[in-house]
Amino acid sequence: MAEEQRLMRILAQRTQRGLKAGSDGFTTTTLLAFDIGLNTRTLRRVLDAAVCAGAAERRDNGPGKPFSYRIRVRS
């Protein structure tokens, strides 16, 4: 549970930093795996649950490339 909270906190920080820098705020699971120290399969399971709950967004980057996630941005 602590790792899930840490993951969501780091994803929120990366999303905000990316948006402030002018990007779309999406972060790949590969990059998050280095930040959190968990494998990408575990990260995807947690992040997919957040997508289903409406807390995050997922982007498909094409065949053979990792998914990207960001915290849902409210307008």
Image (tube, rainbow, N blue to C red):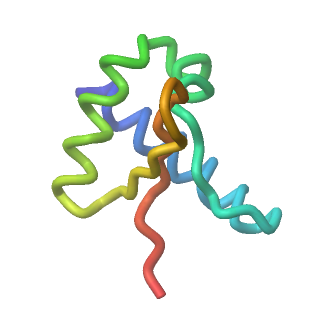
Residue drawn 39% across the image and 57% down it: 57
- Say if 14 sits above or below 2 in the image: below
Is 62 left or right of 56, judged from the image as shown?
right
Residue 29, image x and y in percent? 50, 30
Residue drawn 56% across the image and 23% down it: 30
Residue drawn 34% across the image and 37% down it: 5
Label count reads: 0
- Say if 32 sits above or below 27 in the image: above
Residue 70, image x and y in percent? 49, 53
Return the residue found at the far front. Answer: 63
- Say if 59 sits above or below 68 in the image: below
Question: Which quarter of the picture shows residue 46?
Answer: top left
Is 69 left or right of 46, judged from the image as shown?
right
Question: Which quarter of the picture shows residue 72?
Answer: bottom left
Quarter of the image containing the N terminus?
A: top left
- Say if 22 sits above or below 25 in the image: below
Residue 12, image x and y in percent? 52, 52
Residue drawn 27% across the image and 53% down it: 51
Residue 39, image x and y in percent? 42, 11
Return the residue found at the far right. Answer: 21
Is 39 left or right of 34, judged from the image as shown?
left
